[in-house]
Image (spheres, rainbow, N blue to C red):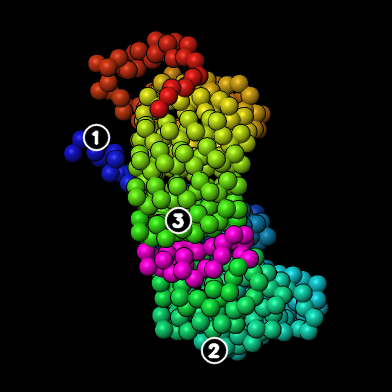
Amino acid sequence: MDATTENSQRRSFSIKLWPPSQNTRQMLVERMTNNLTSKSIFTQRYGVLTLEEAEENAKNIEDTAFTTANQHYEKEPDGDGSSAVQLYARECSKLLLEVLKRGPGTKEERGVLASEETKDDKQELESEKVSAAHETLFDISKGKRSFLEAEKAEEILRPLKEPGNSYTKICFSNRSFGLGAAKVAEPILVSLKSQLKEVDISDFIAGRPEAEALEVMKIFAAALEGSILKSLNLSNNALGEKGVRAFGPLLKSQSSMEELYLMNDGISEEAARAVCELIPSTEKLKVLQFHNNMTGDEGALAISEVVKHSTLLEDFRSSSTRIGSEGGIALSEALESCTHLKKLDLRDNMFGVDAGVALSKAFSRHADLTEIYLSYLNLEDQGTIAIVNALKESAPLLAVLELAGNDVTAEAAPVISACIAVKQHLVKLNLAENELKDEGAVHISKALEEGHNQLEEVDMSANFIRRAGARLLAQVVIKKPGFKLLNINSNIISEEGIDEMKEIFKKSTDLLGPLDENDPEGGEGDEESGEGEGNEDELESKLKNLEVGGQDD
């Protein structure tokens, strides 16, 4: 197997870093427990916690950090979940430090805390009761995931029964409703449906047998049928076609919906067709998200029909949905009608060159685009060139451009740089895991040189970049007033080049990402091509004279 074939196969899928496994989470709890009970600078100063105290605190820390990171992953997707993992680690560290500095509690304090914890539910209910007339959001998703049965449901949903309450938004996520709990919720939802505008019932049947889960869905769907919702979130419920059809009465009754979320729902070809069949109108739809499903090409054809009639669509996400060339072309053609589009996320599919070219035609109609996520689509040079040529003439306020992992070579660099040069509102640029090399790095650097004062993040990791390209890129971004991170890891920068990078960022070390996966020996076989370390200065001299320009597709 040659390197090109291996590289192409490697990029046909991506590794998901989030969510962590239960074993990983438990190991972290054990590690934090050990930190809280072992001798260290902090425990010497503030005191060692008892094992019981440490275990309780460690579990609370991990649960809080996981919830925060998971919410970030859902709201600010990054494809592989790496930013969620980083946030998870940061939150755990921050909270652990807070507990260490607080130190152990006395027996009396622990007794008071335990007493207060037993009163939490009652106090929460009293507080909700007082404010029910003024609150608009009722949210039971906070804290640990739990199974909800009839008795607990009666208690936790009581504020929704208060006469004259003003709740227009409900979030039942992260609680697994059993049949008994669903029957408790049913009359409450019926009584509220005339005032509800936003309903989030994502992840509300986790761990339930299929028969029970489907029955719970049917109860909720019947109770909410006829409501006039602006937003409906059914994500993380492993719906499949059966689940989609279980929600049929609710979906069929919605003609004014502005946001629909069906992420991580097992939306297969059949389920996608059911969605298309059941939703009567998408004329007002502004947000449509299908992330992490098994839609495939046939399913994409059905979703394309929904997209085609969603002319007000502003945010469309169909990342990690196993869509190939045929489905990609259909979606791209459907997107031509969405002239108000602001955010597009199609990452981690198998579009290929033809779908990329089709997508470029849609971009000529998308003047309002601010965020574009097109990583890992197998676009290659031809598809990428078509897209950036179209974007150069459109999307003047583009802030995020991601084209990582598309087998893009230095040949496409002049066209990419020509597009980037005119995108003065650019905040984040991701061209990682391509083959742009030094020539591409210098083209991009020259494009970013003038203006771009809003630039915060550039990722050109894993691009076979050497010392010359890395140095110039660093010299350009370090001058941007609000710059936050340059990721140039996993390249082939010499040891001298690494030292130069660190010198450039010596006053702002946090702006330079890790370089631990750089391979200074990675290009040893390139001497014959004139790209060895000894030719870097000559190469840089030539590349610095390059002008940012384009070429026709």
* Mark 2 and mark 1: Cα distance apart in space: 58 Å
Which residue ends up furthest to the left in the rendered image? 1
User: Is residue 136 magenta-colored?
Assistant: no
Which of label 3 and label 2 is nearer to you?
3
Up the image or down, 482 lies above or below 270; here it is above
Is the C-beta separation of discs 3 and 2 under 8 Å? no
Q: Check the picture and name the quadrant holding the C terminus.
A: top left
Between marks 3 and 2, how big is the CA–CA gap? Answer: 38 Å
The residue shown at (40%, 57%) is 301
What type is the residue that disc 3 sits on? Ser
Magenta region, residue range: 256-284
Quadrant assignment, res 149: bottom right
Q: Residue 274, how many percent across, how many down?
A: 43, 69
Residue at the image position 55 percent from the left and 56 percent from the top: 310
> Which residue shows up at 53% across the image and 30% down it?
392
Residue 90 rendering spot, x and y as whole percentages: 57, 51
- Which residue sits at x=46%, y=80%? 213
Residue holding disc 2: 180
Between 435 and 168, the one nearer to me in the picture: 168
- Under mark 2, the amino acid is Gly
> Which mark is first along the chain, 1 or 2?
1
User: Between residues 329 and 48, which one lies in front from this camera angle?
Assistant: 329
For the residue pair 154 and 122, the one nearer the viewer reads as 154
Q: Is residue 320 visible?
A: yes
Residue position for label 1: 3
Label 1: element kind: helix
Q: Residue 264 magenta-drawn?
A: yes
Q: Secondary structure at mark 2?
A: helix
From the image, which quarter does the N terminus lie in?
top left
**Mark earlier in primary sequence (3, 1):** 1
Ranked by sequence position, the earlier of labels 3 and 2 is 2
Residue for badge 3: 304
